[in-house]
Amino acid sequence: MATPPRTGGLSEIGELLGVSRQRAYTLAKRADFPAPIASSRAGRTWDLAAVEAWEKTWDRTAKGGRPKAVTPEPPTD
């Protein structure tokens, strides 16, 4: 008998990838993210092994968002 896949929603994906649930939601909208294996009124469900495989191809260095604020240096007299 085959073991069923480990499954999870956005909260589990967030924990797996070390990101917030909101960030997991954004990642799940990417074209290269694995498709959910089920959907219900409670939300979508993914095969966590597929998400782990996807994580190996994810370039975490490509960060978007607002640039960090630059703190002006105090004037020198």
Image (cartoon, rainbow, N blue to C red):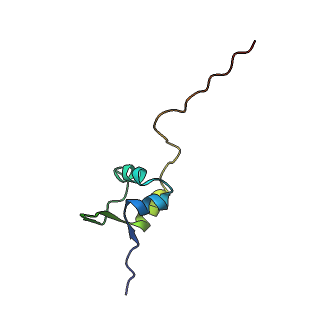
Residue 72 position, x and y percent, is 62, 22
The location of residue 50, given as percent across then percent down, is: 41, 64
- 48 to the left or right of 44: right
Q: How many marks?
A: 0
User: Is 62 left or right of 31, judged from the image as shown?
Assistant: right
Residue nearer the viewer, 39 or 60: 39
Residue 32 lies left or right of residue 57; in this view the side is left
Q: Residue furthest bottom?
A: 1
Looking at the rendered image, the quarter that the N terminus falls into is bottom left
Q: Quadrant of residue 3?
A: bottom left
Residue at the location (58% across, 27% down)?
A: 70
Q: Residue, x 40% and y 51% (percent of image)?
A: 22
Of residue 25 and residue 35, the one placed in the foreground of this image is 25
For the point 67% across and 22% down, the residue is: 73
> Which is nearer the eye, 50 or 38?
38
* Residue furthest to the top: 77
Q: Considering only vertical position in the picture, is 14 above or below 65?
A: below
Q: Residue extending furthest right?
A: 77
Q: Position of residue 14 (x, y in %)?
A: 45, 58
Residue sitting at x 43%, y 63%: 12
The quarter of the displayed image where residue 7 is located: bottom left
Residue 68 vs 37, above or below: the answer is: above
Q: Quadrant of the C terminus?
A: top right
Residue 48 on image: x %, y %: 42, 66
